[in-house]
Amino acid sequence: MPKLVFSNINLKTVKIFRNEMVEKLSKTTNTSRDDFTIEINTNEFLTGDYPFIDIYWFKRDLDVQDQVANIINDILNDNAIEEMDIYFHELEKRNYYYKREHF
């Protein structure tokens, strides 16, 4: 279920690293690759032109969260993006529905 939303990172760049990122995150979070969603925010920002990554997911241990943040940092650094903000949004299972059922 993790959904990653990239702001101020162009589509071409995200396409370069998306498979590697999903593969590594899948192993780290013990989540199927098919459960990941990657989205590009195409809004125009009037201020704050630095890369920002929002991650929507069900709560995991802080150790796993730290590992995910480090994986994202490392991959973006390898693609010439040196600074970014990453924010984790913790979803409540009771508020998430799939096929008419909440988790």
Image (cartoon, rainbow, N blue to C red):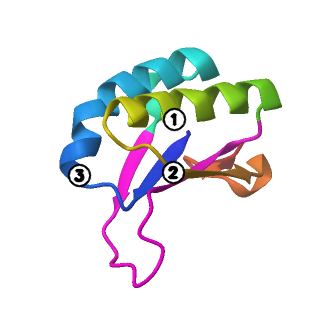
Q: Is residue 52 left or right of residue 97?
A: left
- Residue at 71% from the left image edge and 30% from the top image edge: 66
Q: Which mark is residue 43?
A: none
- Residue at 35% from the left image edge and 22% from the top image edge: 20
Vertically, is 72 above or below 37?
A: above
Residue bounds of the magenta highlight: 37-59
* Among the 4 quarters of the image, the one containing residue 33: top left
Residue 98 image offset from top left, x and y in percent: 57, 47
Tag 3 residue: 11
> Is the C-beta separation of discs 3 and 1 under 8 Å?
no
| Residue 30 seen in the current view | no
- Residue at 75% from the left image edge and 47% from the top image edge: 93
- In the structure shown, which secondary structural element does the residue marked by tag 3 occupy? helix
Q: Along the polypeptide, which appears first: circle 3 or circle 1?
A: 3
Residue 7 image offset from top left, x and y in percent: 41, 61
Residue 77 image offset from top left, x and y in percent: 41, 34
Tag 2 residue: 84
Mark 3: give few (<14), some (14-19) or many (20+) Cα within 10 Å. Answer: some
Q: Along the polypeptide, which appears first: circle 1 or circle 2?
A: 1
| Residue 69 seen in the current view | yes
| Cα–Cα span, label 3 and label 2 | 16 Å
| Cα–Cα span, label 3 and label 1 | 17 Å
Amino acid type at mark 3: Leu
Amino acid type at mark 1: Asn
Vertically, is 52 above or below 24?
A: below
Tag 1 residue: 73
Amino acid type at mark 2: Met
